[in-house]
Amino acid sequence: MDKPSKIAGRVLIVPKHNIDTDMIFHNAHLAITDIKQMGRHTFTSLDGFKDFPEKARPGDILVSGGNFGCGSSRQQAVDCFASLGVRLVVAESFGAIYKRNAINSAFPILTFPGILGAGVSEGDEVEFDLRTGEAFNRTKNASLGKGQPFSGVQWEIYQAGNLFEYGRRAGEEG
């Protein structure tokens, strides 16, 4: 079954730049291996956002600033959002390793330069199109402009469920 190209949900905003993986999921919690337990530690070391796990609801969309997920190659910094049921992370840019981890695990992230100034507010219902990059604020009945759409390979990995499944399918076709 194909995953949808459009993701809509309530927006939670963390309007900061250079949020590193330690701020997303602190290294004190790296012994946690059960993804179901990871969510409660999301942003608990980021001043002003320690209550994020209590505020987040399944189906939410996180909007943040540039260089999101910079730092170490910590898969938990991607998985903690999936644990909370966050459907999508939209940021002005992503750290390279974070971006690769999210793509490889088929967790949807969307690069959207200028999203913090695009007219989206905390709690707005917004729809993002992964294939075109277009965003629409349903609450304000207004376009938010266009971010960077998924690349072809990113879309295929997302549809497959993860990089390993994508590779397995490619091997069967080849």
Image (cartoon, helix red, strand yellow):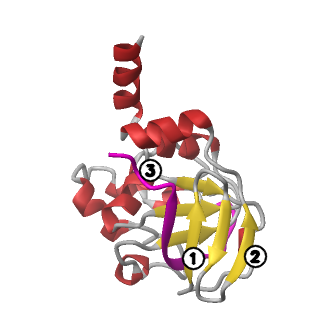
**Number of numbered discs visible in the structure rendering:** 3
Does the stretch in magenta take in 135?
A: no
**Secondary structure of residue under mark 3:** loop
Disc 2 residue type?
Ala
The first of marks 2 and 1 along the sequence is: 2
Disc 3 residue type?
Phe
**Secondary structure of residue under mark 1:** strand
User: Is residue 103 shown left or right of residue 116?
Assistant: left
Q: How far apart are the alpha carbons under marks 3 and 2?
A: 23 Å
Task: Tell me the magenta residue range.
Answer: 1-18
Where does label 2 land, which residue?
118
Q: Residue furthest front?
A: 1
Q: Which mark is residue 126?
A: 1
For residue 106, what is the image quadrant?
Answer: top left
Where does label 3 land, which residue?
107
Disc 1 residue type?
Val
For residue 173, what is the image quadrant?
Answer: top left
Q: In this view, does 64 lie above or below 34?
A: below
Does the stretch in magenta take in 6?
A: yes
Q: Residue at x 71, y 58 (%)?
A: 147
Q: Residue at x 63, y 41 (%)?
A: 96
User: Is residue 20 shown left or right of residue 80?
Assistant: right
